[in-house]
Image (cartoon, grey):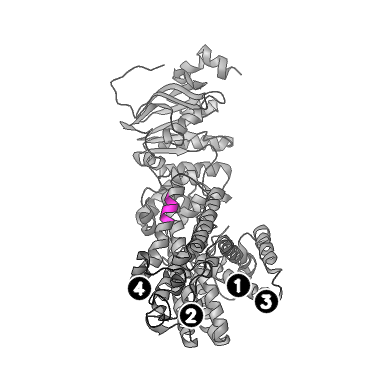
Amino acid sequence: MTDNRFFNRSEFIGILVLAVFLVVVLPLTLDVFRLNLVAKYLTYAFVALGLVICWGYGGILSLGQGVFFGLGGYCMAMFLKLEASSVENTKIQSTPGIPDFMDWNQITALPLFWKPFSSLTFTIAAIILVPGIFALIIGTAMFKRRVGGTYFAIITQAVAAILTILIVGQQGYTGGINGMTDLRTLKGWDIRPDHAKIVLYFFEVGLLFACIMIAQFVRHSKLGRILVAMREKEDRVRFSGYSVANFKIFAFCIAAVFAAIGGAMFALNVGFMSPSFVGIVPSIEMVIYTAVGGRLSILGAVYGTLLVNFAKTSLSETFPELWLFGLGGLFIAVVLAFPNGLAGIWGDYVQPRIDRLITSRKPKPDGWTDSSVADGAPAE
Amino acid sequence: MLVGHQPKEFLLAVEALTVSFDGFKAVNDLSLYVDENEIRVIIGPNGAGKTTVLDLICGKTKATSGSIQFRGKELTRMKENEIVKTGVGRKFQNPSIYDDLTVFENLEISYPRGRSVFGALTFTRDAAVRDRVHEVAEMIFLKDRLNVNADLLSHGQKQWLEIGMLLIQDPDLLMLDEPVAGMSVSERAKTAELLNRIIKNRSVLVIEHDMKFVEDIAHKVTVLHQGQILSEGTMEKVKNDPKVVEVYLGH
């Protein structure tokens, strides 16, 4: 039984371990450059976290999470870009006071949809609402018509492709293929120096844990169990009086909002946003992070993302050509050999041994027994 | 083949129901009336349209024409989950339960509260839920298996679990598609006992092939053949109907 509405005892230990790792171990052992790399990787962990709920629990495979990552990222980048494009900073342009790429594309006034992004409050609301509402529209259109499985995955891919083409094509409004670069300050606070990177890292870790808590709450609610039930026997759920479509829409929307928060943090930490984080390839990579971490494990998603990205960075420096094959091979290997990813390996092999060690020393306390699987993955 | 207009209020009145799949009429101009607290068994050869009738009533299949009135409400225009809320429960032919969840969680999901997204998020497992789950678990002989994952149950236990998931909804009309298929002799006897216990204050519509079982439980039997009613009445009457013997019971 659960100890509260968020986690049981073993999940609490798991969250604590992750917190110590991210808040104490990494900042103490890594230099600022590496820590900023971790911050960049962690922005993808938000996406992976959403995929655990949407894909792992709900069985809805979205191959277009880059769309929501991108929408969140672009909302944040628009705010930062506007602030960086003050009249003073852009006085060499033919139209000062508008972003540089607009000036290069012969646009002479700030487009209407850009104007509200000079407000931080509006921007924060937009980061949540734009992807949320977009997911709501796609989800409603698809799930109410009972489009699911592979068809849904293909449609999300198509959306990712469309959005990329749109962003690249509308260069004057979006910065095109280069994206929005040269982001400098947030409300006058420079985001580029080392100390800002450190502050942003901790802020991001805080947000990540907030999202983990939301995910844990969803998982432990009846809604979490309905998602699992739906994944197995959709008709049974429907004929138990639930509107299956509404639950799918919810799971898809929450995944979209998480992805968008990740995207916004990406723009802040990395200092630019471009269409290369929106399209099909990054979207699929994000699914791979989730699969490697274990699609049923909330914490596994974070570890999977970090691991694959560290591997990507070190391997792509040494074997730039081979890396993509390696990534594809990894995905196939995980799906075939370890369908529950790292969390599955942990739960099947490591955790039972730890449990045995603990139980041989002291009697089992109540409420400990049902958690033989690590990181909150449901027992399979 | 109308049974005739009777002044009494029926729980379920199916009239002139037809469904055609690419021109093939799986159910053809079928009319069927079920009383309150009646156990009605539908029998018939394979392909007679028995399961399709249940699919039509619960909304899984949309009718081509005709009407299905349940307590005066027209079901043919409703969504599946709305039909459930009016009081119709459906058990599928193969046990349709959630393997990854425990018996308790299987029953809890079927408990009729918190069925909206927000309701499910804020749903709490309070004493009322726990008591009801235990009560139903006892009825379906799974009292001591509540914390077992459902995939570890035997086939017969899975069938009971699904019946329990319907019971906890407390439907006015319970539709069971071959509830004893694949069960052992002792499990069959227990299931008959279970059904006889749970029919109080509700009607049951059962599809079954096992004639011994049908005799045990049926108040009235409807024989379907090629999407139409071949015969209807008590088991005794149906058994001696030469048409029924020819197409179904004879071989």
- Check if mark 3 and mark 2 are on a common chain: yes
Q: Which mark is residue A317?
A: 3
Spatial separation of the CA atoms under disc 1 and disc 2: 17 Å
| Residue farthest along the left direction in this orientation | B7
Spatial separation of the CA atoms under disc 4 and disc 2: 24 Å
Extent of the magenta region: A135-140
Element carrying mark 3: helix
Does the magenta run of residues contain A148?
A: no
Q: Is residue B139 visible?
A: no
Q: Is residue A155 visible?
A: yes
Reading the image, the residue beneath label 2 is: A201
Which label sits in the foreground, 3 or 2? 3
Q: Chain of mark 2?
A: A
* N-term-proximal mark, 3 vs 4: 4
Taking the spot 50% from the left edge, 37% from the top edge, the residue there is: B191
Q: Quadrant of the N terminus of chain B?
A: top left
Element carrying mark 4: helix
Element carrying mark 1: helix
Q: Chain of mark 4?
A: A
Reading the image, the residue beneath label 1 is: A309
Which label sits in the foreground, 3 or 1? 3
By secondary structure, the bulk of the magenta-drawn segment is best described as helix
Which label sits in the foreground, 1 or 4? 4
Spatial separation of the CA atoms under disc 3 and disc 2: 24 Å
Q: Amino acid at mark 4?
A: Ser
Q: Amino acid at mark 1?
A: Asn
